[in-house]
Protein backbone atom coordinates (compact mmCIF):
# COMPACT_ATOMS: atom_id res chain seq x y z
CA UNK A 1 0.00 0.00 0.00
CA UNK A 2 2.83 2.24 0.82
CA UNK A 3 4.48 1.42 -2.47
CA UNK A 4 1.69 2.56 -4.77
CA UNK A 5 1.50 6.25 -4.08
CA UNK A 6 5.25 6.30 -3.94
CA UNK A 7 5.57 4.64 -7.31
CA UNK A 8 2.69 6.79 -8.65
CA UNK A 9 4.58 9.83 -7.42
CA UNK A 10 7.76 8.42 -8.87
CA UNK A 11 6.04 7.85 -12.21
CA UNK A 12 4.60 11.32 -12.17
CA UNK A 13 7.93 12.69 -11.13
CA UNK A 14 9.73 10.77 -13.90
CA UNK A 15 7.20 12.00 -16.45
CA UNK A 16 7.64 15.53 -15.15
CA UNK A 17 11.40 15.15 -15.40
CA UNK A 18 11.02 13.81 -18.91
CA UNK A 19 8.96 16.82 -19.92
CA UNK A 20 11.40 19.19 -18.23
CA UNK A 21 14.35 17.39 -19.82
CA UNK A 22 12.81 17.23 -23.30
CA UNK A 23 11.90 20.93 -23.13
CA UNK A 24 15.46 21.72 -22.06
CA UNK A 25 16.85 19.52 -24.84
CA UNK A 26 14.58 21.16 -27.36
CA UNK A 27 15.80 24.58 -26.23
CA UNK A 28 19.40 23.46 -26.50
CA UNK A 29 18.67 21.98 -29.92
CA UNK A 30 16.93 25.15 -31.09
CA UNK A 31 19.75 27.25 -29.67
CA UNK A 32 22.35 25.17 -31.53
CA UNK A 33 20.28 25.27 -34.72
CA UNK A 34 19.96 29.05 -34.55
CA UNK A 35 23.73 29.27 -33.93
CA UNK A 36 24.27 27.20 -37.07
CA UNK A 37 21.90 29.37 -39.09
CA UNK A 38 23.48 32.60 -37.84
CA UNK A 39 26.96 31.08 -38.34
CA UNK A 40 26.11 29.92 -41.85
CA UNK A 41 24.61 33.30 -42.72
CA UNK A 42 27.73 35.06 -41.40
CA UNK A 43 29.95 32.61 -43.27
CA UNK A 44 28.11 33.04 -46.57
CA UNK A 45 28.31 36.80 -46.04
CA UNK A 46 32.09 36.49 -45.56
CA UNK A 47 32.36 34.30 -48.69
CA UNK A 48 30.38 36.92 -50.60
CA UNK A 49 32.70 39.69 -49.34
CA UNK A 50 35.77 37.63 -50.33
CA UNK A 51 34.35 37.00 -53.81
CA UNK A 52 33.71 40.73 -54.26
CA UNK A 53 37.30 41.45 -53.15
CA UNK A 54 38.68 38.84 -55.62
CA UNK A 55 36.60 40.40 -58.42
CA UNK A 56 37.89 43.89 -57.70
CA UNK A 57 41.52 42.63 -57.45
CA UNK A 58 41.07 40.90 -60.82
CA UNK A 59 39.84 44.20 -62.31
CA UNK A 60 42.81 46.05 -60.77
CA UNK A 61 45.21 43.49 -62.29
CA UNK A 62 43.80 43.87 -65.81
CA UNK A 63 44.23 47.64 -65.48
CA UNK A 64 47.82 47.37 -64.17
CA UNK A 65 50.32 49.10 -66.45
CA UNK A 66 52.52 46.68 -68.41
CA UNK A 67 55.31 48.03 -70.67
CA UNK A 68 55.04 47.07 -74.32
CA UNK A 69 57.76 45.48 -76.48
CA UNK A 70 58.64 48.85 -78.05
CA UNK A 71 59.23 50.37 -74.60
CA UNK A 72 61.52 47.53 -73.55
CA UNK A 73 63.37 47.91 -76.87
CA UNK A 74 63.90 51.63 -76.24
CA UNK A 75 65.50 50.66 -72.90
CA UNK A 76 67.73 48.12 -74.66
CA UNK A 77 68.68 50.82 -77.18
CA UNK A 78 70.07 53.04 -74.41
CA UNK A 79 72.01 50.18 -72.78
CA UNK A 80 73.36 49.06 -76.17
CA UNK A 81 74.70 52.58 -76.69
CA UNK A 82 76.18 52.92 -73.20
CA UNK A 83 77.73 49.47 -73.52
CA UNK A 84 79.67 50.61 -76.56
CA UNK A 85 81.16 53.68 -74.86
CA UNK A 86 81.95 51.71 -71.69
CA UNK A 87 83.81 49.13 -73.83
CA UNK A 88 85.62 51.84 -75.79
CA UNK A 89 86.79 53.37 -72.51
CA UNK A 90 87.73 49.86 -71.30
CA UNK A 91 85.54 50.52 -68.30
CA UNK A 92 84.81 46.80 -67.79
CA UNK A 93 82.69 47.08 -64.61
CA UNK A 94 80.38 49.55 -66.40
CA UNK A 95 80.32 47.37 -69.55
CA UNK A 96 79.42 44.34 -67.40
CA UNK A 97 76.64 46.36 -65.74
CA UNK A 98 75.22 47.46 -69.12
CA UNK A 99 75.15 43.96 -70.62
CA UNK A 100 73.45 42.85 -67.37
CA UNK A 101 70.76 45.49 -67.94
CA UNK A 102 70.20 44.21 -71.48
CA UNK A 103 69.89 40.62 -70.17
CA UNK A 104 67.37 41.72 -67.51
CA UNK A 105 65.28 43.54 -70.11
CA UNK A 106 65.31 40.47 -72.37
CA UNK A 107 64.01 38.44 -69.37
CA UNK A 108 61.29 41.05 -68.80
CA UNK A 109 60.26 40.82 -72.47
CA UNK A 110 59.90 37.03 -72.12
CA UNK A 111 57.80 37.50 -68.99
CA UNK A 112 55.62 40.50 -69.90
CA UNK A 113 55.33 40.23 -73.69
CA UNK A 114 54.85 36.46 -73.96
CA UNK A 115 51.70 37.15 -76.01
CA UNK A 116 53.78 38.74 -78.81
CA UNK A 117 54.72 36.15 -81.47
CA UNK A 118 57.99 38.05 -82.20
CA UNK A 119 59.30 37.03 -78.77
CA UNK A 120 59.93 33.53 -80.16
CA UNK A 121 62.81 35.01 -82.24
CA UNK A 122 64.48 36.49 -79.15
CA UNK A 123 66.60 33.37 -78.64
CA UNK A 124 68.80 34.34 -81.63
CA UNK A 125 70.50 37.02 -79.49
CA UNK A 126 71.90 34.53 -76.94
CA UNK A 127 75.24 33.74 -78.71
CA UNK A 128 76.01 37.48 -79.16
CA UNK A 129 75.26 38.17 -75.48
CA UNK A 130 77.53 35.26 -74.43
CA UNK A 131 80.30 36.47 -76.73
CA UNK A 132 80.28 40.05 -75.42
CA UNK A 133 80.07 38.85 -71.79
CA UNK A 134 83.16 36.72 -72.44
CA UNK A 135 85.00 39.70 -74.01
CA UNK A 136 84.19 41.85 -70.95
CA UNK A 137 85.38 39.13 -68.55
CA UNK A 138 88.60 38.77 -70.58
CA UNK A 139 88.94 42.60 -70.69
CA UNK A 140 89.73 42.18 -74.38
CA UNK A 141 89.08 45.37 -76.45
CA UNK A 142 89.38 43.59 -79.83
CA UNK A 143 87.03 40.77 -78.86
CA UNK A 144 84.69 43.38 -77.36
CA UNK A 145 84.59 45.24 -80.68
CA UNK A 146 83.90 42.14 -82.81
CA UNK A 147 81.29 40.90 -80.30
CA UNK A 148 79.59 44.30 -80.34
CA UNK A 149 79.39 44.15 -84.15
CA UNK A 150 77.86 40.65 -83.83
CA UNK A 151 75.39 41.94 -81.20
CA UNK A 152 74.34 44.87 -83.39
CA UNK A 153 73.94 42.64 -86.46
CA UNK A 154 71.76 40.29 -84.38
CA UNK A 155 69.51 43.19 -83.32
CA UNK A 156 68.97 43.93 -87.00
CA UNK A 157 68.57 40.26 -87.96
CA UNK A 158 65.74 39.96 -85.46
CA UNK A 159 64.16 43.21 -86.64
CA UNK A 160 64.31 41.76 -90.14
CA UNK A 161 62.85 38.40 -89.04
CA UNK A 162 59.99 40.16 -87.23
CA UNK A 163 59.19 42.61 -90.09
CA UNK A 164 60.68 45.59 -88.25
CA UNK A 165 63.64 45.98 -90.61
CA UNK A 166 63.00 49.76 -90.69
CA UNK A 167 64.39 49.88 -87.10
CA UNK A 168 68.07 49.86 -88.00
CA UNK A 169 70.61 49.72 -85.17
CA UNK A 170 74.20 50.84 -85.69
CA UNK A 171 77.40 51.45 -83.75
CA UNK A 172 76.93 54.86 -82.09
CA UNK A 173 79.08 57.92 -82.87
CA UNK A 174 78.55 60.06 -79.80
CA UNK A 175 77.81 59.22 -76.15
CA UNK A 176 74.07 59.33 -75.44
CA UNK A 177 74.22 61.47 -72.31
CA UNK A 178 76.48 64.38 -71.49
CA UNK A 179 75.98 63.87 -67.75
CA UNK A 180 77.51 60.40 -67.51
CA UNK A 181 81.22 59.61 -67.39
CA UNK A 182 82.19 56.49 -69.34
CA UNK A 183 85.89 56.53 -68.40
CA UNK A 184 86.71 54.38 -65.38
CA UNK A 185 87.29 56.62 -62.34
CA UNK A 186 89.47 54.11 -60.48
CA UNK A 187 91.35 52.19 -63.18
C1 LIG B 1 62.63 39.44 -81.03
C2 LIG B 1 63.79 39.85 -81.78
C3 LIG B 1 64.40 41.17 -81.48
C4 LIG B 1 65.67 41.36 -81.02
C5 LIG B 1 66.72 40.28 -80.70
C6 LIG B 1 65.86 42.78 -80.92
N1 LIG B 1 64.71 43.43 -81.27
FE1 LIG B 1 64.44 45.45 -81.22
N2 LIG B 1 62.53 45.21 -81.83
C7 LIG B 1 61.92 44.01 -82.07
C8 LIG B 1 60.52 44.24 -82.40
C9 LIG B 1 59.49 43.17 -82.73
C10 LIG B 1 60.33 45.63 -82.35
C11 LIG B 1 59.02 46.40 -82.56
C12 LIG B 1 58.37 46.58 -81.21
C13 LIG B 1 57.03 47.26 -81.25
O1 LIG B 1 56.08 46.66 -81.75
O2 LIG B 1 56.92 48.39 -80.75
C14 LIG B 1 61.62 46.21 -82.00
C15 LIG B 1 61.84 47.57 -81.88
C16 LIG B 1 63.05 48.13 -81.57
C17 LIG B 1 63.30 49.54 -81.47
C18 LIG B 1 62.29 50.66 -81.76
C19 LIG B 1 61.66 51.06 -80.47
C20 LIG B 1 60.80 52.28 -80.63
O3 LIG B 1 59.65 52.22 -80.15
O4 LIG B 1 61.27 53.27 -81.19
C21 LIG B 1 64.61 49.72 -81.10
C22 LIG B 1 65.34 51.02 -80.87
C23 LIG B 1 65.17 48.40 -80.95
N3 LIG B 1 64.21 47.45 -81.25
C24 LIG B 1 66.45 48.16 -80.53
C25 LIG B 1 67.02 46.89 -80.43
C26 LIG B 1 68.40 46.64 -80.08
C27 LIG B 1 69.44 47.72 -79.77
C28 LIG B 1 68.57 45.30 -80.09
C29 LIG B 1 69.80 44.50 -79.86
C30 LIG B 1 70.59 44.72 -78.66
C31 LIG B 1 67.28 44.71 -80.44
N4 LIG B 1 66.37 45.70 -80.65
C32 LIG B 1 67.05 43.35 -80.52
C33 LIG B 1 62.49 42.75 -82.03
C34 LIG B 1 63.79 42.50 -81.63
Image (cartoon, helix red, strand yellow):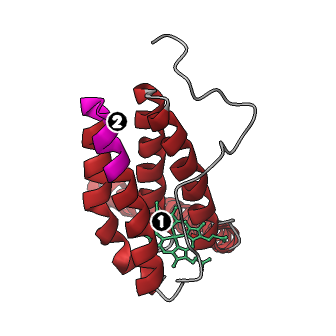
Q: Secondary structure at mark 2?
A: helix
Instruction: Name the spot of residue 61 as percent of width and height, x first.
Output: 63, 68
Residue in view at x 58 percent, y 57 percent: 77
Instruction: Name the spot of residue 186 as percent of width and height, x first.
Output: 49, 10
The answer to whether residue 43 is left or right of residue 104 is right
Residue in view at x 69 percent, y 65 percent: 65
Instruction: Name the spot of residue 5 as percent of width and height, x first.
Output: 37, 58
Q: Is residue 123 magenta?
A: no
Q: Nearer the viewer, mark 1 or mark 2?
A: 2
Nearest the viewer among 110 and 91 is: 91
Q: Secondary structure at mark 1?
A: helix
Q: Residue furthest right?
A: 178
How many numbered callouts? 2
Q: Provide the major secondary structure of the magenta segment.
A: helix
Number of the label disc, if any, that sits on residue 37: none
Residue at which label 2 appears: 141
Q: Is residue 162 above or below residue 111?
A: below
Disc 2 packing (10 Å; few <14; some 14–19; many ≥20): some
- Would you identify the image quadrant in which residue 12 lies? bottom left
Q: Which residues are magenta?
A: 136-146
Q: Residue furthest bottom?
A: 163
The answer to whether residue 53 is left or right of residue 124 is right
Residue at which label 1 appears: 109
Residue in view at x 58 percent, y 62 percent: 72
Q: Is mark 1 within 8 Å of ligand 1?
A: yes
Which quadrant would the N terminus be assigned to in this image?
bottom left
Residue in view at x 54 percent, y 39 percent: 85
Disc 1 packing (10 Å; few <14; some 14–19; many ≥20): many
Amino acid sequence: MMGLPKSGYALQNNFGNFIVQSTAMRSVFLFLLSCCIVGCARQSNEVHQLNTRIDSLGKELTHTYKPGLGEFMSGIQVHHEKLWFAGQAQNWPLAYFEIGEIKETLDDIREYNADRPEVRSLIMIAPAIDSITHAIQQKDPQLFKSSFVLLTNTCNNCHFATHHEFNVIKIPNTPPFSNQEFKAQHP
